[in-house]
Image (cartoon, helix red, strand yellow):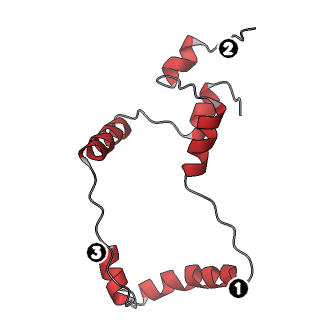
Amino acid sequence: MSATIAISKRKIREADGVVVLPVAEYRRLVERSVPTYYLAGKKAETVDKLVEEGPREYREGRTRKITSLAEYNALRGRAPRSEFVPTAAQKRALARAENNFRRGRTLTYGEFSKALGGAR
């Protein structure tokens, strides 16, 4: 038994293409995406307080501009970490991704879903 999926050419053109993935691959990509954290209790109160106090401290000039995470770690008394050095293949992949982003060849999940006719 074979299934047929119909996607209009207009929608594909509007979306600048379509990607078809097996469900397992899609789930793996979702798991690697940026996670959403929900805090409760003391941790939530601490973050709320930081968010509330941060802009006020900035306006009052009580913040400091840092230029790197290494500088931040030094201020906090943390040991420096070794610097990430990408491989040649990783540099090429990053350049390709940046080029695609500049040319607008990226889709959010919502845009992708809309291109498929609202299927989720």
Can you tell which quarter of the image residue 65 is in?
Answer: bottom left
Q: Residue furthest left?
A: 88
Q: Is residue 88 visible?
A: yes
Can you identify the residue that label 1 sits on? Answer: 42
Q: SS of the residue at dot 2?
A: loop
Q: CA distance from mark 1 to mark 2?
A: 50 Å
Residue at 68% from the left image edge and 79% from the top image edge: 44
x, y percent for residue 15: 51, 26
x, y percent for residue 17: 49, 22
Q: CA distance from mark 3 to mark 1?
A: 30 Å
Q: Amino acid at mark 2?
A: Ile
Q: SS of the residue at dot 1?
A: helix
Is the residue marked by circle 3 packed among few (<14), some (14-19), or many (20+) residues within 10 Å?
A: few
Can you identify the residue that label 3 sits on? Answer: 67
Q: SS of the residue at dot 3?
A: loop
Q: Amino acid at mark 1?
A: Lys
Is the residue marked by circle 1 packed among few (<14), some (14-19), or many (20+) residues within 10 Å?
A: few
CB contact under 8 Å: marks 3 and 1: no
